[in-house]
Image (tube, grey):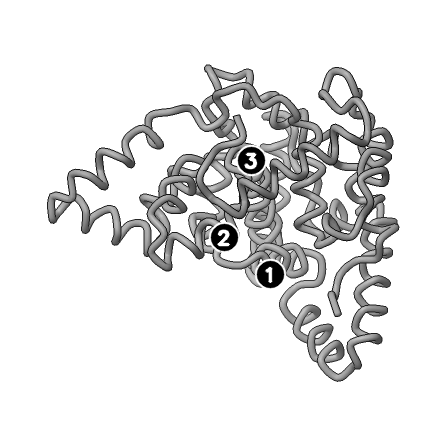
Amino acid sequence: MKIRASKSQAIKLVSENASEYLEFFRDFQAYDGGWLIWPEKLHILKRNLKLDNYVTLYSDQKLIDGSLMLFLMGRDGLKEWGKELSLLSPEDQQSKIEILAKETIEDDFAWVDDALGKWPETPEEEIKSNEQFDLLDEDTKKQLIERWQFLFLHILSSIHNFFSIMVNGESMTSLVPKAINGDIEAFFKSVKIDRNLLSLHPYFIERYQHAQTNGHKDFLKRLAPYQATPQLIGRIRYPGLYIVFAMLETLRWLDDLTHSEILDICDAAGLDRWQNRIEDVNSVTKQLKRYRRYQKTSGLSMH
């Protein structure tokens, strides 16, 4: 059986968050010709919180999910929760996961501000936050930094995962393992979405350096366009629908919902049918088939 959030929980999560991811996508799509440009604050975060290893989370969706769990529970809490889960039957595991999902969905996360401090929005707030942080003991500082690291590891890897599904028709957690197993096209597609792989991921660093050192001209020639082309360039006709597909697939519910239910999610998420080219159930059916075809062939983009 599949261990996952309940159907109603998955629908609620996607309905409430799809529009935010769509706006995020459109911001990047409209910026500088389609290049996926990180805001300067995100670069600073990556450096200060030492988040370079976020690219290694692409190896398995469980690692991305685990980062969120570590943020929510902490190391000790997650270890204890996992121990309790392992002693249960599959049916009771499902029940326990659904309870956790329900609590997470309904949580207003006010505790985050209390425990970790509110994220500063202005230079003045940042100065005040740094001063308050400096007053803490070293052990508390370490714990707070670690929790922030887990949160942003999850965010960075999840964002690129969704972008990859929209642009490539396949997630980074699918492409990167294929690339590591020798799939050259998966290697190229992964790099197209996240250039940091070539400088941060051990396998990609080694493969790229090997090609350069040994004069693999064909490999380097084929790789070059993926490095030089904006990640989000092209006419993505159904961005809202693809975001919904991506989120449902991550939650492992995409194959188990009717196309009418998916259309209802789009409506609940506030995705305008005509603006997002989601006219009716037939549109959902047609695009889901196309989406699956690209995943199976791994040969074409979704532009």
Distance CA(mark 2)–CA(mark 3):
13 Å
Distance CA(mark 1)–CA(mark 3):
18 Å
Mark 3 secondary-structure assignment = helix
| Three-letter code, disc 2 | Tyr
**Residue occupied by mark 3:** 163
Distance CA(mark 2)–CA(mark 1):
9 Å
Q: Report the quarter where the N terminus lies.
A: bottom right
**Quarter holding residue 194:** top left
- Residue at the image position 79 percent from the left and 81 percent from the top: 89
| Three-letter code, disc 1 | Lys
Q: Is there any visible trace of residue 247 in the rendered image? A: yes
The numbered mark at residue 62 is 1
Furthest-bottom residue in this view? 87
Q: Earlier in the sequence, mark 2 or mark 3?
A: 2
Mark 2 secondary-structure assignment = helix
Q: Residues within 10 Å of mark 2 (few under 14, many from 20)?
A: many
* In the foreground, 224 or 129: 224
- Residue at the image position 54 percent from the left and 45 percent from the top: 295
178 above or below 227?
below
The spot of residue 217 in percent (x, y) is 15, 39
* In the foreground, 207 or 158: 207
Q: Is there any visible trace of residue 141 in the rendered image? A: no
* In the foreground, 302 or 116: 302
Q: Residues within 10 Å of mark 1 (few under 14, many from 20)?
A: few
Q: Earlier in the sequence, mark 1 or mark 3?
A: 1
The numbered mark at residue 58 is 2
The spot of residue 111 in percent (x, y) is 79, 50
Q: Residues within 10 Å of mark 3 (few under 14, many from 20)?
A: many
- Residue at the image position 78 percent from the left and 76 percent from the top: 90
Viewed as shown, does residue 266 lie left or right of 189? right
